[in-house]
Amino acid sequence: LVPPTATPDPARQVNGVPFADIAVLPPETAAHVREIVAHGRELGRNPRAFSKLGDSAVLTESNLTRFDGGPVDLGPYAFLQPTVDHFAGSWGRYGVAARVALTTIGALDPMWARAEYCTAGEDPISCEVRLNNPAVMLIRLGTNDGSATLYETYMRQIIDLLLAQGVVPVLGTKADRFEGDDSINAVTRRLAAELRLPLWDFDRVADTLPNRGLTDDQAHLTVYGRNDYSDPQTLTRGYPVSDLTALIVLDAVREMGLKDEG
């Protein structure tokens, strides 16, 4: 007899892409995340806070803020509401590690820090960790880097900085191809696997969207008036789908030791 094939849970997919392909946390990554969380606990990190590291794509009302301020209807994804609640206050917070045109090297450079919030010589990442005390850093960079080689060099430094501070780096892929090919996403996936870090593979779902969820500038994501996941149109737009995939990966990370702390 041929054993039955497991049927994918229809609720745990986005446009046909399974959650496991969006939030990539194999067993060795899950174990490493628990270690990072434990280190963060020793340093007093807030298990109910995450921060955003990114460029102009992060600095918009359409990016994640609706999970704090609405309008949102999770529809078939209502089972993710506990994670929305767990990280309340972080969704709507822009933070100081999100800057227009930010690159990986800029994220490490005190010249990119906001002087009104950060101390002399403090880079944007360290400043954001000090101000928000997050357990997790949700990272989407690379659009402005140009070179996958430079991106990898400085992303490794970003990761080292976050790990030393007990913050879980969540590495995000991007929908655009500004470097001319898909080499930066390839580096992101490779780093996540090599360093046993959570991968937020938004690019995997961007493949299902019209024009990959991008506007005519081929850099920024398409918007919609509300994050209503019971409305099929919501799942055709870049930002609402990006938000949902971020929620999915943060839900997975929350299971790795943050849940017990809340």
Image (cartoon, rainbow, N blue to C red):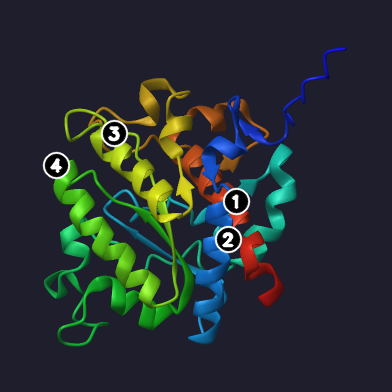
Q: Amino acid type of disc 3? A: Asp
Residue 30 vertical position relative to residue 189 in the rendered view, above or below: below
Q: Which mark is residue 176?
A: 3
Disc nearer the start of the sequence (2/4): 2
- Ranked by sequence position, the earlier of labels 3 and 2 is 2
- Which residue is found at the position 19% from the left and 42% from the top? 148
Numbered disc in front, either 4 or 3: 4
Residue identified by numbered label 1: 27
Bin the neighbour count of mark 2 within 10 Å (Cα to Cα): few under 14, some 14-19, many 20 and up: some
The numbered mark at residue 4 is none
Label 4 with label 1: CB-CB less than 8 Å = no
Q: Which residue is at 43% across, 50% downward?
A: 63
Identity, as a three-letter code, of the amino acid under mark 1 = Pro
Q: Disc 1 versus disc 3: distance between alpha carbons?
A: 29 Å
- Tell me the element at label 1: helix
- State the residue position of label 2: 31
Give the CA separation, mark 4 to mark 1: 33 Å
Query: Of circles 3 and 2, which is in front?
Result: 2
Relative image position of residue 92 (x, y in whole percent) = 48, 63
**In 3D space, how far apart are the residues under numbered discs 3 and 2 (Cα atoms)?**
31 Å
- Find the residue positioned furthest to the right: 1
* Residue 34 x, y percent position in the rendering: 58, 67
Say if mark 1 contacts mark 2, CB within 8 Å.
yes
Q: Which mark is residue 146?
A: 4
Neighbourhood count class around disc 1 (C-alpha, 10 Å): few under 14, some 14–19, many 20 upward: few
Kindly give the residue lying farthest to the front in the view shown: 1
Q: Earlier in the sequence, mark 1 or mark 3?
A: 1
Q: Amino acid at mark 4?
A: Gly
Give the image location of residue 168, x and y in percent.
Answer: 46, 65
Seen in the image, is 258 located left or right of residue 66?
Answer: right
